[in-house]
Amino acid sequence: MRKWGALTAISLGSLLFLIDTTAVTVALPDIGRSFETSLTPLQWVLNIYTAVLAALMLVAGSVADRYGHRAIYLAGLTVFTAASLVCGLAPGIAVLIAARGVQGVGGAAMAVTTFALIGSSYAGRDRGIAMGIWGAVNGLAAAAGPIAGGLLTQYISWRAIFIVNIPLALLAIALTVRSIAVVSGVRGKRFDMAGLVSLFRIASFNALMVCGVISASVFACLVFTSVWLQGTLKLGPVDAGVAMVPLALSTFVTSTLVGRRLQHIPPRVLIGTGLLLGGAGCALQACLDAGSTALSILCGLIVTGVGVGVLMPAMGTALFATVPPQRFGVAVGASTTARQLGQTLGVAVLGVVFQSGVDAVDGLNRVYLVAAGLGFAAAATGFLLIRENVGTTV
């Protein structure tokens, strides 16, 4: 078990910065009532976090290369912990939004280093297993966040969503210090702009970036699913979270199983299949009417979860295989930026689509159809453009 201590520390960090995206979606109605605010400021509670993450990924990756991934991971955990405390104690919506922005600073440092720390801590079959488990935790965090947020919001307070981060982050810090070896960075290294530009000459890398941006729209749908479940169906936060459990479970089980076979299946096959299933799952949910219940989206959630479970570990393995080792730090920053940018754009764009509907049901159907179309387009990109050879240029 000792050799998996590093993976536990890394997975805890991933769990923290991902779950604070989806857990908050269920709490938004309560936050709005608490501060007597409208939908637009509430959207910023989500968007400021993902926007800061996206904006700082490349910088954080460069800093991590210079000072060491372990050191920057620990710094990110520390900042995230402090910001979580301020979020939990926020006296108003403006302070909450600002603290969420600071959370994003810590989250950026954690996001770009978790991936690299797995690469430096494990090799061969162990790396494949670690990537599968890490991907499963990521999928579980992103998908199970709503039920965690619902439980905390309904039985304690929306503030508990942030306060609970503190003991988990402290545990992650302790495990990191104990289990992950210190590897010095390259102190004289500056931001590798030439290296970043060279990456965009690799066809597979470009395809991975496109797939990363578009696939994030799947999780953006959860915001509007939560609005429908609570606003239209009048479910409480816990019941709304329970309605999304099938997505979490199917993601976790699939990602765990896929991780054990990553070495034997071409990445483009897994990535294309995952995106295709994600799009199909969204399409299956786009048939709601006035008589629909939470069970109406069950099949679609399961198919989407299976797709995400296939996609997440495969994306990580494909990046390892596609990028030359000397460009890995900046590649991780670019990849994580793409995903967070996709999440931010997804919430904003799908928000416009949702509000264009004649009512919440019609708006949500439109959201699912748009997300399905994007998923199918991303699947085609993955199948056609992700190649097997490292460094294959355009």
Image (cartoon, rainbow, N blue to C red):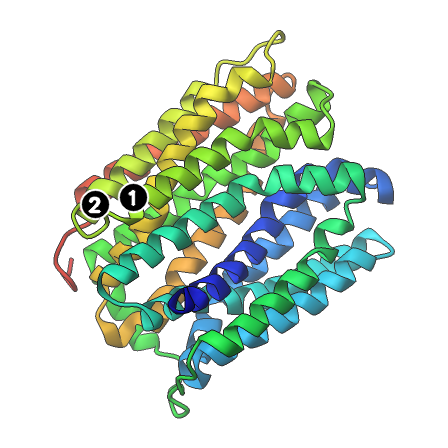
Left or right of 20? Residue 323 is left
Of all residues, the one furthest to the bottom in this rendering is 188
Q: Name the residue under label 1.
A: 258
Percent position (x, y) of residue 345? 51, 46
Do the numbered discs 2 and 1 sit on residues whose CB atoms are within 8 Å?
no
Q: Is mark 2 on a helix, strand or loop?
A: helix
- Depicted 280 relative to depicted 340: above or below: above
- Depicted 331 relative to depicted 366: above or below: below
- Quote the CA–CA distance across marks 2 and 1: 14 Å
- Depicted 49 relative to depicted 190: above or below: above
Categorize mark 1 by other alpha carbons within 10 Å: few (<14), some (14-19), many (20+).
many
Q: Identity of the amino acid at label 1? A: Val
Where the C terminus falls, by quadrant? bottom left
Query: Residue at the spot x=35%, y=78% of the render?
Result: 192
Percent position (x, y) of residue 97? 73, 56
Left or right of 126? Residue 138 is right
Which of the numbered marks, if any, corresponds to residue 113?
none
Percent position (x, y) of residue 268? 21, 45
Percent position (x, y) of residue 350? 54, 34
Of all residues, the one furthest to the top in this rendering is 291
Total marks shown come to: 2
Query: Residue at the spot x=74%, y=27% of the render?
Result: 236
For the question of whether residue 37 can be seen, the reply is yes
Which of the numbered marks, if any, corresponds to residue 268?
2
Where the N terminus falls, by quadrant? bottom left
Q: Residue 361 versus residue 319: which sits nearer the camera? A: 319
Q: Is mark 1 on a helix, strand or loop?
A: helix
Q: Identity of the amino acid at label 2? A: Arg
Q: Residue 101 versus residue 307: which sits nearer the camera? A: 307
